[in-house]
Image: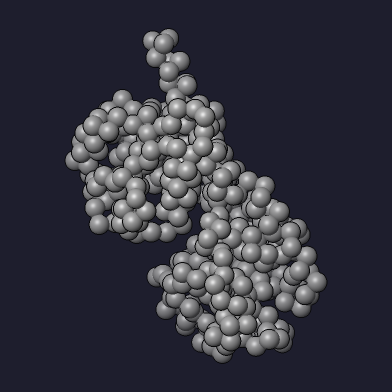
Amino acid sequence: MSTEVPLLIAHVDAERGFSGGEVQVFLLLEGLRSRGHRCVLVAPPGSRAEAEAMKRGFETRAVPLSSDLDLRSVVVLRRELSRLQPDLVHLHTGRATWLGGLAAWRAGVPAITTRRMDRRVSRGLRTRLIYGKLVQRAAAISPAVARCLTDGGVDAARITLVPSAIDPARIRPHLGREHVRAELGAGTEDVVLLSAAALVARKGLDVLIEALARLDQRGVRPRVWLAGEGEERADLQRRIEQHGLEARVRLLGRREDIGDLLAGADVFVLPARREGLGVAALEAMSARRPVVASRIGGLAEAVVDGRTGLLVPPDDAVALASALERVVLDPVLRDRLGSAGPGRVSEGFLPEQMVAAYERMYREVLAECSAARKLA
């Protein structure tokens, strides 16, 4: 626990669902609580984040945050902040940053935001207002995300790099490797490729299927597990059938047992077209699995080419097929790349490292605000 005075932090998350961003929010909430800080989650009523916070014993405040034009939520949130009087507000999504930033500014409470998307912010009045006035600091989860902010006109001095972390509990297997493989139809001699990602266009799973078709023509036939759900499922299934890969490529749907899947797999694949960091790849590295991924965004910084995995250009099925062929046919390479994974993760992607970085940021922002008030 920190020897400094504990803080009261209001965290604002506008999402109704629960995805990778929310996993990071709760890693942070748990870590801050363990250090003695008081955290209150502001989330839409009935959202999965609200339910999860209540289950874990965190204080919650329900505010709709239904759209970027939901100015009534700004009024409600400002009122809640005035009652709560937190030391600082932490904004966790784009909508939360806009609405929560306005509310925090009106309530006179300093705010920071976390940016997770590797998409350049648009230059304009709204960006200048958010990053020049409403928030005191922006946390970028990777250098690539930081560049997206600066390319959009955000002052680099107001950006702090705070990488996302992996949740050790998520990758802890509960079943044995043989059990998982038998359940999913993989034999002892099969090499299994795993991808765990939303089935959406930016994850590039269509490129993976095209690469698998090329491997099939070369007589290289790994088994493939695709864990996730999304709008591209029907198209991916069509592509699998078109290339005659149904016997070896399985769409597993949404899975919560990523630890078991990693234990059963041999290689992790993430051919994304955009990726802020690539926590799924970090999880695979922590589980000692080599990663084949796109050289894009934060993913290219998380995975060290030739050390923990192989990087290929995005949208390049030929290059992806070649990289997959290398790891499928070379067990020594798989072992070398996989063995280096935990060491890479320990270089800045552990929960305690993320929590400590945010705690430092909070105190720096509060010190800056205090100094500014004294000069005013």
Quick check: can you spot residue 292? no
Q: Is residue 11 left or right of residue 276?
A: left
Quick check: can you spot residue 102? yes
Q: Is residue 205 left or right of residue 312?
A: left
Q: Residue at x 56, y 58 (%)?
A: 168
Q: Is residue 205 left or right of residue 74?
A: right
In the rendered image, residue 20, in percent from the top left (x then y), is placed at 46, 57
In the rendered image, residue 5, in percent from the top left (x then y), is placed at 45, 27
Q: Residue furthest right?
A: 332
Q: Is residue 199 left or right of residue 322?
A: left
From this view, report whether residue 258 is shown above or below residue 308.
Answer: below
In depth, the one of 307 and 362 nearer the eye is 362
Q: Residue at x 41, y 69 (%)?
A: 230
In the rendered image, residue 201, in percent from the top left (x then y), is placed at 47, 66
In the rendered image, residue 14, in percent from the top left (x then y), is placed at 32, 49
State which quarter of the image contains the C terminus. top left
Q: Residue at x 68, y 80 (%)?
A: 191
Numbered label tally? 0
In depth, the one of 160 and 118 nearer the eye is 160
In depth, the one of 178 and 197 nearer the eye is 178
From this view, report whether residue 292 is shown above or below residue 295.
Answer: below
From this view, report whether residue 192 is shown above or below residue 319.
Answer: below
Q: Residue at x 37, y 40 (%)?
A: 39
From this view, report whether residue 362 is shown above or below residue 322.
Answer: above
